[in-house]
Image: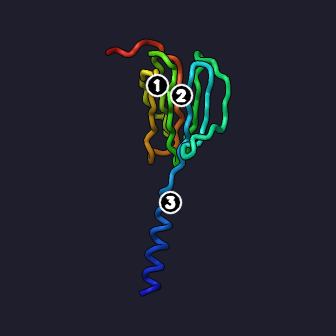
């Protein structure tokens, strides 16, 4: 009985580790790109950035991206998601103070953030 119980806990622990994911948190402001720890909210990296230049963030297949668009006024941002197989999706989001998450389990991808080329139709 004890061996079965130990085996059961071992299988559960293995499944939890296999399905574990990391979360990358990036905040985009008009003049700064901030990377921080999702669990503790501790800032890991701050770098100046030009709001007009596109930003590319690589997300591994075991990770989820938490993208915080903080422009402090109503603005629009183009978000292009490019999967490993070359398939892509293009969206335009409001970016006053919104948070978006990438899907988990779709393989690695690149997320490109840039100023919107045209306004979103409402």
Distance CA(mark 1)–CA(mark 2): 18 Å
Determine whether 61 is above or below 1 in the image: above
- Where is residue 72? Give x, y as percent: 50, 19
Q: Position of residue 110 (x, y in %)?
A: 54, 35
- The reply to whether discs 1 and 2 touch (Cβ–Cβ < 8 Å) is no
CA distance for labels 3 and 1: 34 Å
- The image position of residue 92, as x and y in percent, is 42, 22
For label 1, the SS is loop
Residue highlighted by disc 1: 97
Q: Quadrant of the N terminus?
A: bottom left
> Which numbered disc, 1 or 2, marks the residue closer to the eye?
1
Q: Which of 84/51 is in front?
A: 51
Residue at the left extreme of this rendering: 122
- 107 in relation to 88, above or below: below
Indicate whether 32 appears above or below 62: above
For marks 2 and 3, the one nearer the N-term is 3
Q: Are marks 2 and 3 in contact (CB under 8 Å)?
A: no
- Label ID, residue 112: 2
Q: Secondary structure at mark 2?
A: strand
Please name the residue shown 56% across and 23% down the image.
Answer: 29
Label 1 crowd (10 A; few <14 / some 14-19 / many >=20): some
Report how far apart the C-alphas of labels 2 and 3 lie in the structure.
28 Å
Q: Name the residue located 46 percent from the left edge and 21 percent from the top edge.
A: 96
**Would residue 45 appear left or right of 101 to someone viewing this image?**
right
Q: Does label 1 or label 2 sit earlier along the sequence?
A: 1
Q: Nearer the viewer, residue 108 or 94?
A: 94
Nearer-the-camera pick, 71 or 57? 71
Q: Position of residue 108 (x, y in %)?
A: 52, 43
- At mark 3, the secondary structure is helix
Q: Is residue 121 left or right of residue 41?
A: left
The dot on residue 18 is 3
């Amino acid at each position: 009985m004890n061996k079965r119980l130990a085996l059961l806990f071992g299988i559960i622990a293995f499944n939890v580790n296999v399905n574990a994911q990391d979360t990358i948190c990036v905040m985009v402001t008009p003049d700064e790109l901030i990377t921080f720890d999702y669990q503790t909210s501790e800032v890991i990296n701050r770098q100046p950035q030009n709001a007009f230049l596109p930003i590319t963030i690589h997300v591994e297949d075991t990770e989820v991206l938490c993208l915080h668009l903080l422009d402090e006024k109503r603005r629009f941002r183009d978000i292009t998601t490019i999967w490993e197989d070359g398939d892509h999706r293009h969206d335009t989001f409001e970016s006053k103070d919104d948070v978006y998450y990438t899907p988990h389990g779709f393989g690695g991808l690149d997320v490109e953030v840039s100023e919107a080329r045209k306004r979103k139709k409402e």
